[in-house]
Each structure stands twice: as C-alpha cells, then as structure tokens.
Image (cartoon, coloured by chain):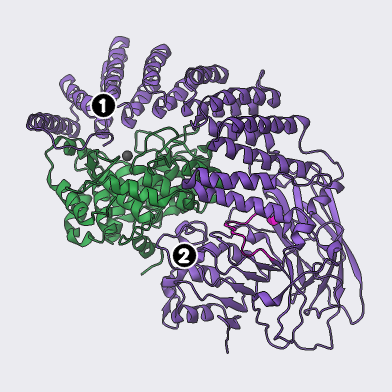
Chain colours: A green, B purple
C-alpha cells in the first residue's frame, strides 16, 4: 500500500489553486470558500500551513462577506451559512478571528434559527440538520453560543433521530453518515451526547466498513474516502471507533492516492479532488497515522487550533 | 467528484473540455452581472437556466431565479396565465437540472419553493418522483421530497406504508424503503390507527416480512436494522421500573465511623465504614429516568430528621437523567455499647413524577425495607495511625470462605417480588415471539454459517434471559450465557474486522455470567490482608482481573462493592462505574485506558480513596475518543467561562493538563498509582500532588 505521499499532496493543493481555467475548477467556483478550507486544513494537518500567505487569504475572505454578516462561496455569490462556517474555520486556522466583527457574524448565524429550533441555510429557508451543526459549530468557535436557543436546537436534532440510531436531514429522513456527523457533532459541542444510543449508532456506523476496508455512507452503498471522515469522527465522538478495523481503512485511503501527481480520490483509480484529499488526510489523522497533526472530531479543525480557542492563550 | 476515472485526458478531450469551461465561465459571468444589476428579463433568465442545467449546484443562480419570479409575479398583476407560465418555467428548469444531477440540494429546494407558491398538480409531482425513485430507489432526496408531497396532499400513512410494501416486495435490498416503513409504522402504532392495533398482531406480520428478506440474502444489510428495531419493540417495556438498590430489601446494614477490626462485623458484605456520618442509598432503574426527588421517593426512618433528601443522578453527563440515583442518609453518633437498630422503608411510584426519557411514567408502586445498625466507635484503637497503603499483590488476597454466603447481597431482583401490584413485565406473546425467533435463527444457522444469523441469535438469547429474569426473578436462572459467549467467539473469527465489537459484547455477557448467582460471584471474592501491615482491616475485594474484559456491565448487581480489582484486562472504557458509590479502592492497572478523560465516571465516586491506573495508555494517543464524553469547555459542560491559563500551579500551566485537571481536581484520593503511562513524568506527578492535597501515597512513595 505504500506510504502517505505528503509532499505530493502539498504540491497538488497548491496546483489546484493555480489552474482556474479547466472545467472542474469552473464548476467548483461558487464554493471556493469550502475549497479553501479543505485545502488549507489539509496543509495544516500536514504541517505545511506556513507556505501560504495569510494576509492574501484573509483579505480574499473578507471580500466575500456581505453587509448582513454572512459569507458567500466566492466573490459576487450570495451569503450562505455553509460558507460562513468555512470562513470562520479558515480564520481560526490562521489565528485571525480578530479581523471579524464577531457580533455581526453571530447575528447573521443566529438569525437563521427557526421557531422549531431548526436552522435555515440562508434567507430562502432550506432547512437541514447540516445547518444546525454549522450554526452551532460556528457560534461556539466565536464564543457566542448564547445567541441561540440551544435547547430548541438540540430538540430539533433529536427529532431527526431514526430507529437505527442515526440521523437524517429533517424528521423522517433516512440516516446518512454525513448527516450523522453533523448531528453527533452538534450534540457533542452542546454537551448533549446523552441523546444518542451509542451502542446502536456505533454498530450501524461500524457496519459501514466493507470488505475492501473502506467505509460507505449508508447500507449497501459503495465505499468512499470522504466517509472516512464522516463515519470516523462520529465513531470517535461516541467512543466506538475501536469497532472498525483501522489498519484496513488506512490501507484503503492510501490506495486512493494519486502517487504521481498527488491528491486523493473517492475510490482507487478515480480522479482526485481537494474535497477527497482533505477527507483522506483528515481521516488518516483520526486514525493516528504518524507525522500528522491531530484533528478535533467535532470542530473539524486541528486540536491545537481548537485548544487555543477554548483554553485561552 | 465521485466515480470519475483518473486518467490523463486525450488531446481532443482536453480541447472539448476547454470549450465547455469557457462556455460555463461566460454563462457564470453574465449571470452574476444580471444578478447584481437585478435584471430579470427573459434573456437574462435564460442565461441562468442554461447555467443551472449544466451546473445545478450554483446556489446563487437559484436565489436569483427566486428573486426574478417574485419580481415578475408582482409585475404580472395576478393574470392567471402569466403566473402559470412563470411557475411552469421554474418547474421545467428544476427538472432538467435534476436530470443533470438528481442529488442537487439546490434544485430540490427550488421545487419545494415553487410548490409553496401554489402551483403544480400533485399527480405531476408523483409522476416525477416515480421516475426518479425508479431510476434510483435509494435517492434520499426523492424520499424526502415524497414525504413533503405526501404531507402537502394529506396522503395517509397507510397509503405510504403500502408504497413501501410494494418497493420492498420488488426488491428486498432497499434500505430506504425499510427505513421509511419504520417511520410510518411507528406513527401508526403510536396513534393506534385502526388496523394497527393491537401492536402484537402488527409486529408478528412485520417479522414475517423481514424474515423473507433475511432468508433470501442473509448478507444484505437492508433487513438487519429493521429486525433489530422489531426486536427492540418486542422486548422493551415502556415504563421504567426498579431493578436493584443498595441497601437491598431485607438487608441488615452495619455502619461505623472507624474501620472495623476483623471479627467485630458480622459480615464485611454488610458493613460500611464512613467518616462523614452518612451512607448512600442507591436506586437502579431499568432505564434512564428523571424526576427522582424527595416528593417521588419516600424514605421513612428515624435516621433522617427532615424528608428533604437530595437525590443526585449517577451519570457522566449533565442531562439530569440517569439509570442510577443516589442520596445520603445520616446516621447518628452513638454511645459506646449501644447497638441500636433503625428500620428504613423506601417507597416509590405512589405519585407520578419519575419518567423515562421517552416520557413513560414509573407506574408500579413499590417499596422495600432494610435495617441499619450503628456500631459505636472502637475506643481501644483510638486514633487511626496514618493512611494505609493498599498493595494489590496476589499474596495479599485470600480466597473468601463460604461461611458468609448467606449475607452476600446479590440477586437483588428478589426485591421486585415485594411490589404491591405484581404484574409480569413480559406477556406470553413476548416470550413466545422471542422463542420463535430463536428457533428460526437456529434453523438458519444449521444451513449456513452467516454473521447476521449468529449475531441475531446471540442478541435473541440475551433478550430472552433478561426478559425471563425480570419476569420471574426467583424462578429463572441465566441459562444461555455459555452459548452466547461461544457465538461471540465464533463471530470474532468469522468477521475479524469487527472483532472488538464482538469482544465488547462478550465482556457484557461475562459480567452477566459472573453476577448471575451467589456461587459465581463468591468465586471472585477475596479477603484483602496485607501481611506487612498491622492494620487487619476487613476488606472484601471483588477480583475480576485477567478476564480479557473490554467494557463493564451488570453494574446493578455490583452496587455493594467497596474494593474492586479490574487489573490486567483490556478495558478502554469504564463507563458504568459511576453508579458504584461504595467503591473506595479500585485497581485499573494494565488496561487500555487511553486518556484522562476516560476516567470521567470516577468523578461521581465520592468514596474513592485508592486508585491504581498504572500501565495504561494515558498520553500515548493523539486522538482522544472520550474528549466529548467528559465535562469540558469544548462541550460547554464545565461551568462558566474557564480560562485555564489563569490557573498556574508551581510553573505548571493547567492548560497543558486540562484533562487531568478536570478529572483529578474532583477526586479525594489518598493513594494513586500512575506509573507506566506515557503522560507520567516528574512534572505530571508534581502537578497531581498540587491538584489533590489529600494524596498521601503516589506511585508507592509516601508524600510528606
Ligand atoms: Zn466522496
């Protein structure tokens, strides 16, 4: 299986930033803020964040902010909670949260909470437990969790719990590993993990591991590197990660590397992208692969960044 | 990107891709220009439509179209034809965007938005859904949209249930349909809709349906989780009930202020030493409950002068709910040679208030009684000489004689027989159903060796034993544990990737086996006597060392334990120990505990004095799997805004040891062993000494 091609992945991430003209880059343009977070977080886990000029990144981020306090996915795009979290996470990576008007950002995020405790993604009212996680994570990083009704937010998430122990996007929605990460993460940050049946959910999650060692996101689906993150982080937060075979998963992720040009793909021999490169490297960090910075399973940021925010300086 | 092959594009492909990219870029630029200039003409709308048909994920373009629709609707002055044509165009754009990417959140949401404007016919939506659900029967966007439509058109749960039946019958391997079925059926059962009552009849039919799926392809996971849910519906009793207590019913407790010299106590199992003048009263319920307080629990005795006992939940979270609850009862200072006995009567369930997390009330009024004898202080011994150093050496443990057999306080289910209104918790139907399932899975396993068959059989056998134990505690003995242990050992070999899941389950069965009878428990009870010490204390130690245990179970049977040896196991978690309020000496050495936060349950143990956590893996892991199961500022569960940097103890920044600080600052240990952990060095040890002023012994060295 070989080793993690750390240096090649660094080069790959830097190269993605440069080639803006191929079709895939244009397709991804509206979510460049997410892309920046995936790329920069990968560099930080690999211990290479210093090769990026923080000033350049920070000034670009700030041009994506709107009057309402929310951030768009790129210059000219509308504000949305998805990109607001990525902006906050990137600023946290660089220890630059002080450039934000924190009241304004937290007002935008808390303003998206609905009467039933759920969150909309933006002013157009799409409701999803992903947005509950994003709001809670974002406000917690800004020390402004008191701006929302946490109890209602938690109750809404609990109302999306299924009989298999997992969670869906809205009440009645099918369990899905990505959605489970969001709900478990939000419950972890709000100290509400007691709402989870750890053994039931843990078994469902550990059964996501298929013969190849990779993890899928739902029963009877194909494995995919991005689920290394969604499933692993959830298993870690409920202390059940020992129920999967970690070595086999490490091998699966390493098998998805492009060993020539760098980058990681969803499955072996597929085309690589920044999204899967991040989730592959973050997954290896959760698996305690040597030489990587540890990542926090709830805030999706390196542990040293999270500790800096919560334990003062 | 998903499922795109990794290969260098051929020159002609690269050229075509460049053309496509240029086209898309130009559409995007034109669209953003229109958006920023609020241009909502037909031409401008066509640009955004073309863009979305190529890339439905450009969320700003959907926002733009909604602004345009609102603008154009306000211009149309509610002319029905133009309203219709504006909204129809939106539905058309959504449909072609979904053809490009049926997982596009933005496209599905846009369609919902259009529908809330009161357009489109339900039939049209159902036809569209049918198309997408046939193309991909697992598309959860389509299933979510289906629920939205069903609610919009007031389609009944029965009709939707029929749809899942059809989907399942055409393909058993459709987890989405099984999932939807479980949701619908819970609604129907909960509301007792006609045809869905009694529950037993419905569940019996569901078992038949899922058997077909499981027996058609036992390796397909779709039916597994549904079967587990049915099993859970069958065995779980809604209302919580009491399963054990300490002191147990009929117990004669002896409490004393000083340690008992050997021979004065009638039995070390029934004597409890306390230097605070109180002893705990513990209640253990069948499930986590809230509302345990002095108005729901009546304690009648001469011991407590007021009735306002403070009950505390014994859980490691701040939820206010717990399976085990404790309070402290005072005992009076008695004079020499006065051996007075105080009766205590505990009643619960006489008024409502104790409820499970799902809202069910404790509904069986019950009571139990015990006596307390306060032993006067032993004047001959006078002041205690220093603090004893417990040495966990084999030679200090002596197999316990059988002459105290009569007083060992186990099989506490006995007390259930004193319920005022005895009512069996399991009906014939429950017992019969589990028996049928057991027979069926035995039959499956006689034909093929399959994982789900073994696992389900193991779970069924355990469910059977537990059900029978609660149902008739005096008549039933755990009978299946050997068979279940064998099944789990088989599973470890059959499915090695999940071997540690099976190992955890195996441990729980072992705990059940050890605690299931007096005989088996006594085999693990030892008398502790340190040959070098002058103190001849009457410690009884439960020794569960060297058993390959990886997690803790059956705690409700172990509430009486004061000294516990769990060393040389494979414990990674000690969840459950928080209920063992009498514990004063605990040996966890040579296990797999991998962080300080894993010790969170110990923070609830107010009597704990002696702790051995040597030779574990604390500090050896970069990822802490109990980081969020422990109170801390990360989860907003550590009262107030802590700035850990403000706490500096002799040059050691608390921030570097915040986990250790959170755990150990709440303990009152006199003796601690930490050697053999990655975190342990001189700096850490001096930190511990500062955090725990009560500490007298650290790693076998006496502190001064
Ligand atoms: Zn993926």
Which of the 4 image quadrants contains residue A295?
A: bottom left
For disc 2, the marked residue is B641
Mark 2 falls on what kind of element?
A: loop
| Towards the viewer: B158 or B77 | B158
Q: Is residue A198 visible?
A: no
In the rendered structure, find residue B398 and report the number of the disc placed on it: none
Q: Residues within 10 Å of mark 1 (few under 14, many from 20)?
A: some
Q: Identify the residue at horizontal 76%, vertical 44% (top origin).
A: B470
The secondary structure that dominates the magenta segment is: loop
- Numbered label tally: 2
| Towards the viewer: B536 or B364 | B536
Q: Residues within 10 Å of mark 2 (few under 14, many from 20)?
A: few
Q: Position of residue B194 (x, y in %)?
A: 67, 18
Going by the image, does B489 lie left or right of B652?
right
Q: Position of residue B398 (x, y in %)?
A: 74, 73
- Asked whether mark 1 and ligand 1 are closer than 8 Å, the reply comes as no
The C terminus of chain A lies in which quarter of the figure?
Answer: bottom left
Residue sitting at the far front = B447
In magenta, the rendered stretch is B543-556
Q: Are marks 1 and 2 in contact (CB under 8 Å)?
A: no
Q: Identify the residue at horizontal 59%, vertical 59% (top origin).
A: B548
In the rendered structure, find residue B65 and report the number of the disc placed on it: 1
- Report ligand 1 position as a quadrant: top left
- Residue B546 within the segment the image draws in magenta: yes
Which of the 4 image quadrants contains residue B396?
A: bottom right
């Amino acid at each position: 299986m070989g080793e993690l091609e750390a240096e090649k992945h660094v080069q790959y991430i830097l190269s993605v930033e440069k080639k803006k003209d191929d079709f895939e880059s244009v397709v991804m343009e509206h979510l460049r803020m997410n892309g920046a977070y995936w790329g920069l977080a990968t560099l930080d886990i690999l211990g290479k964040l210093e090769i990026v000029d923080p000033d350049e990144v920070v000034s670009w981020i700030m041009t994506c902010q709107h009057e309402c306090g929310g951030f768009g996915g790129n210059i000219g795009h509308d504000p949305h909670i998805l990109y607001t979290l990525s902006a906050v996470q990137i600023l946290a990576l660089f220890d630059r949260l002080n450039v934000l008007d924190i009241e304004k950002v937290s007002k935008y995020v808390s303003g998206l909470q609905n009467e039933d405790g759920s969150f909309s993604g933006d002013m157009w009212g799409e409701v999803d437990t992903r947005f509950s996680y994003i709001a809670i994570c974002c406000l917690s990083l800004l020390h402004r969790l008191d701006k929302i009704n946490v109890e209602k937010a938690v109750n809404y998430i609990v109302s999306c719990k299924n009989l298999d122990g997992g969670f869906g996007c809205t009440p009645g929605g099918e369990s899905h590993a990505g959605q489970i990460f969001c709900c478990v993460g939000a419950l972890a940050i709000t100290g509400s993990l007691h709402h989870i049946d750890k053994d039931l959910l843990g078994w469902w999650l550990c059964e996501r591991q298929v013969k190849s060692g990779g993890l899928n996101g739902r029963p009877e689906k194909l494995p995919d590197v991005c689920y290394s993150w969604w499933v692993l982080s959830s298993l870690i937060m409920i202390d059940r990660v020992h129920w999967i075979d970690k070595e086999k998963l490490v091998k699966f992720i390493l098998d998805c590397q492009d060993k020539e040009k760098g980058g990681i793909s969803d499955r072996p021999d597929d085309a690589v992208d920044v999204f899967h490169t991040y989730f592959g490297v973050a997954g290896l960090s959760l698996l305690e692969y040597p030489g990587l910075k540890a990542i926090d399973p709830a805030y999706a940021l390196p542990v040293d960044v999270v500790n800096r925010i919560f334990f003062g300086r | 990107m998903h499922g795109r092959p990794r290969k260098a594009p051929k020159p002609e492909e690269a050229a075509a891709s460049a053309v496509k990219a240029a086209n898309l870029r130009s559409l995007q630029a034109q669209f953003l220009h229109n958006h920023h200039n609020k241009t909502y003409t037909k031409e401008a709308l066509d640009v955004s439509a073309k863009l979305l048909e190529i890339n439905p994920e450009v969320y700003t373009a959907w926002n733009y179209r909604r602004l345009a629709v609102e603008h154009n609707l306000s211009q149309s002055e509610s002319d029905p034809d133009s309203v219709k044509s504006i909204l129809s165009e939106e539905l058309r754009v959504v449909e072609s965007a979904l053809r490009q990417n049926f997982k596009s959140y933005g496209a599905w949401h846009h369609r919902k938005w259009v529908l809330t404007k009161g357009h489109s016919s339900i039939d049209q939506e159902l036809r569209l859904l049918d198309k997408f659900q046939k193309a991909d029967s697992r598309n959860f966007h389509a299933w979510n949209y289906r629920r939205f439509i069903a609610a919009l058109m007031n389609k009944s749960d029965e009709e939707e249930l029929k749809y899942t039946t059809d989907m399942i019958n055409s393909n058993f391997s459709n987890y989405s349909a099984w999932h939807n079925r479980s949701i619908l059926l819970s609604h129907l059962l909960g509301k007792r809709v006609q045809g869905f009552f009694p529950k037993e009849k419905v569940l019996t039919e569901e078992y038949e349906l899922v058997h077909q799926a499981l027996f058609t392809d036992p390796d397909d996971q779709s039916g597994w989780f549904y079967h587990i849910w049915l099993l859970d519906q069958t065995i779980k009793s809604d209302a919580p009930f009491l399963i054990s207590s300490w002191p147990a019913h009929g117990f004669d407790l002896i409490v004393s202020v000083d340690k008992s010299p050997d021979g004065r106590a009638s039995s070390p199992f029934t004597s409890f030493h306390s230097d605070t003048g109180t002893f705990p009263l513990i209640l253990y319920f069948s499930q986590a409950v809230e509302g345990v307080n002095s108005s729901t629990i009546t304690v009648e005795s001469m011991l407590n002068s007021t009735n306002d006992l403070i009950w505390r939940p014994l859980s490691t979270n701040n939820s206010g709910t717990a399976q085990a609850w404790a309070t402290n009862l005072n005992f009076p200072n008695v004079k020499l040679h006065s051996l007075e006995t105080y009766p205590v009567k505990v009643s619960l369930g006489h008024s409502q208030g104790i409820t499970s997390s799902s809202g069910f009330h404790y509904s069986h009024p019950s009571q139990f009684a015990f006596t307390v004898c306060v032993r006067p202080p032993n004047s001959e011994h006078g002041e205690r000489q220093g603090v004893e150093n417990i040495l966990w050496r084999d030679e200090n443990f002596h197999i316990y004689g059988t002459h105290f057999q009569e007083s060992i306080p186990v099989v506490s289910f006995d007390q259930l027989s004193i319920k005022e209104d005895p009512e069996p918790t399991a009906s014939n139907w429950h017992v019969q159903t589990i028996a049928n399932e057991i027979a069926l899975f035995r039959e499956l396993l006689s034909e093929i060796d399959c994982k789900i068959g073994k696992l389900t059989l193991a779970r069924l056998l355990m469910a059977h034993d537990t059900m029978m134990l609660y149902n008739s505690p005096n008549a039933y003995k755990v009978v299946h544990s050997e068979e279940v242990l064998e099944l789990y050992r088989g599973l470890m070999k059959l499915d090695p990737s999940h071997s540690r899941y099976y190992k955890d389950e195996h441990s729980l069965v072992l705990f059940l086996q050890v605690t299931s009878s007096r005989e088996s428990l006594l085999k693990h009870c030892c008398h502790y006597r340190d040959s070098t010490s002058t103190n001849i204390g009457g410690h009884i130690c439960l020794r569960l060392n060297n058993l390959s245990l990886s997690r803790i179970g059956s705690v409700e049977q172990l509430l009486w334990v004061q000294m516990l040896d769990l060393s040389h196991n494979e414990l990674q978690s000690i969840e459950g120990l928080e209920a063992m309020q009498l514990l004063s000496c605990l040996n966890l050495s040579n296990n797999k505990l991998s962080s300080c936060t894993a010790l969170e349950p110990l923070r609830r143990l107010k009597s704990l004095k002696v702790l051995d956590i040597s030779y574990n893996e604390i500090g050896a892991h970069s990822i802490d799997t109990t980081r969020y199961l422990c109170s801390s500022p990360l989860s907003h569960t550590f009262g107030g805004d802590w700035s850990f940097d403000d706490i500096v103890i002799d040059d050691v920044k608390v921030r570097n040891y915040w986990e250790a600080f959170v755990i150990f600052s709440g303990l009152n240990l006199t003796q601690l062993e930490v050697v053999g952990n990655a975190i342990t060095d001189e700096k850490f040890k001096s930190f511990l000494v500062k955090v725990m002023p009560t500490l007298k012994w650290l790693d076998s060295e006496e502190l001064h």
